[in-house]
Image: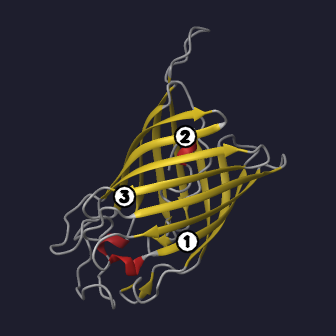
Amino acid sequence: MKINTLKAAVIGALMVPLTAIHAEEAAPAETSDWSISANVGLYSDYIFRGYTQTKHQPAIQGGFDVEHSSGFYLGTWASNVAWTTEPLGSASLPSTSDGYMQDNSVEIDVYGGFGFNVGPVDVDLGVLQFLYPGENTLGAGEADATELYAGVGYDFGFASASVYYYHVVSTDAWGFSDADGSEYWTLDVDVPIGETGLTLSGHVGDQSFDGAGNSASDYTDWKVNVDYALPFAEGYSIGAFYTDTDMDKTTWTVNNEYWGEDVIGAYLSASF
């Protein structure tokens, strides 16, 4: 989804680091304090924090980021989704022919924050807004969600690692009512494999939902990803991943489909 410090945990898709470019290419003059980067990817499935957002169908995703040398950044990212209009009905959800939304097929994320260093440790603080344009279904929790996040990262040389904490501050979130206070913790590790262009990444996350009756949906997710930077096309990479969860099947089965099952997928991505 984003800039280097927001690599994996925000949406669950492991993106390659973005390459910053300057808005102007003047003669050997001064360099700008601002940089712009972009990314686009084609995925066999959009997995967010362990569960499918596209009913196991392909997703095209992309975004833009603007960064200042001070550490301040703003960005946006988007992907097609299918879960918002999926008819509800399970042991823990109301039986209805409607989904959370009557008409929606896209997720748009807007985020901003500030990154800085404390000695060798990278620190990242920000806010993330999930938007699902369209009309909400009467009686269902809002799909839109707002989170504050804080993260720390460290480069060990042979590997880099980061820990992030996300805290919901909106009343509803992803169809859960009264979800203010819900939390998500992540640990992500990237290990470059020599000079091969391969990077092996591991992720584990823990999601807990606040609000009456929402704790039954708490779960842990994990993911392994291998990324190969194409030597003949700078900024392009291909990759494959495996992800799974310990979601309760009764709670997370919607319209007879279990959303938290294990998934093997692949992708092609590019950064500019």
User: What's the mark number on residue 107?
Assistant: 3
Mark 3 and 1 residues: CB-CB less than 8 Å, in contact?
Answer: no
The x, y position of residue 222, in whole percent, is 60, 69
Query: Around disc 3, counting alpha carbons within 10 Å, would you say few (fewer than 14), some (14 to 19), or many (20 or more)?
Result: many
Mark before the other along the chain sequence, 3 or 1? 3
C-alpha distance separating marks 3 and 1: 21 Å
Q: Is residue 263 above or below residue 110?
A: below
Residue 90 lies in quadrant: bottom left
Residue 56 visible to an observer of this rendering:
no
Tell me which amino acid carries mark 1: Asp
Secondary element at tag 1: strand
Say what secondary structure mark 2 lies in.
strand
Q: Residue furthest left?
A: 138
Residue drawn 53% across the image and 24% down it: 22
The Cα atoms of the two marked residues, 3 and 2, are separated by 27 Å
Please report the residue visible at 38 percent of the width from the left and 70 percent of the height from the top: 209
Query: Counting residues from the N terminus, which is met first, the one under dot 2 or under dot 1?
Result: 2
Residue type, mark 3 in image: Glu
Could you give the CA–CA distance between mark 2 and mark 1, rounded to whole angstroms? 24 Å
| Tag 1 residue | 221
